[in-house]
Amino acid sequence: MFGRILFIVVLIPLLELTFLYQLLIHTGFVTTFAVVLMTGVVGIQLARYQGLQAWQEIHRQLSNGKAPSESITRGVLILIAGIFLITPGVLTDTLGFLLLIPAVRTHVARWLKIWFLRKTRSTFETHVWSGFGPRSDRSDDQTETVKGQVRVVNPQASKSANEGSGHLEGE
């Protein structure tokens, strides 16, 4: 996991520098600077507008008593798009703009949901601990039988005579 994160942290800036250098060589400094600045400004405005819409949708769903899970996912992806757009560079701006397209965002959200469900299903495990010590050798199928006799006496007479005595007939 650490290796993947390190790879991404090193790879993305190197790719960004390569793209910016190629853009600088082919168009010049002023154009490169303008492209980076404009994509950031336009992207942030789009992310802000779509983020506000997502927030209103979450609020509307909560007001109606519904769980806003899809709206929250959409809002998080818009936030990630905004972070990509703030980061100067051609690659991150492209990723940010792609996440602002609703069809792309829906596809990414669906993919993330499937990935998350697979991850949680494959790693779910449960343990039950008993605090009562080891079980006895007796199996659960064994039952205890008590033998006795029942004698029926006039129920009405028996009830009034024994009321409050605290014992059963036959004891």
Image (cartoon, rainbow, N blue to C red):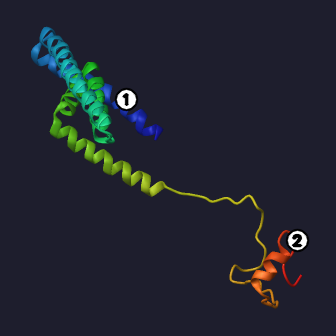
Q: Which residue is mark 1?
A: 10
Q: Position of residue 95 (x, y in %)?
A: 22, 31
Q: Position of residue 46 (x, y in %)?
A: 18, 22
Q: Secondary structure at mark 1?
A: helix
Q: Secondary structure at mark 2?
A: loop
Outermost residue toward the top? Answer: 30
Outermost residue toward the left? Answer: 27
The residue nearer to you, when weighing 104 against 90, is 104
Q: Which residue is mark 2?
A: 165
Task: Identify the residue at horizontal 68%, vertical 83% (top origin).
Answer: 141
Task: Identify the residue at horizontal 78%, vertical 74% (top origin).
Answer: 136
Q: Name the residue type under label 2.
A: Ser
Q: Position of residue 109 (x, y in %)?
A: 27, 42
Left or right for 113, reference 34: right
Left or right for 66, reference 25: right
Q: Is residue 128 above or below residue 28?
A: below
Q: Is residue 169 above or below residue 26?
A: below
Q: Quadrant of residue 83?
A: top left
Q: Are marks 2 and 1 in contact (CB under 8 Å)?
A: no
Task: Classify mark 1: residues with Cα within 10 Å, few (<14), some (14-19) or many (20+).
Answer: few
Placement of the C terminus among the 4 image quadrants: bottom right
The residue nearer to you, when weighing 127 against 92, is 127
Task: Identify the residue at horizontal 41%, vertical 51% (top origin).
Answer: 119
The residue nearer to you, when weighing 31 against 112, is 112
Frontmost of labels 2 and 1 is 2
Q: Is residue 147 above or below residue 158?
A: below
Alpha carbon separation for disc pair 2 and 1 = 88 Å
Q: Name the residue type under label 1.
A: Val
The residue nearer to you, when weighing 126 against 23, is 126
Task: Classify mark 2: residues with Cα within 10 Å, few (<14), some (14-19) or many (20+).
Answer: few
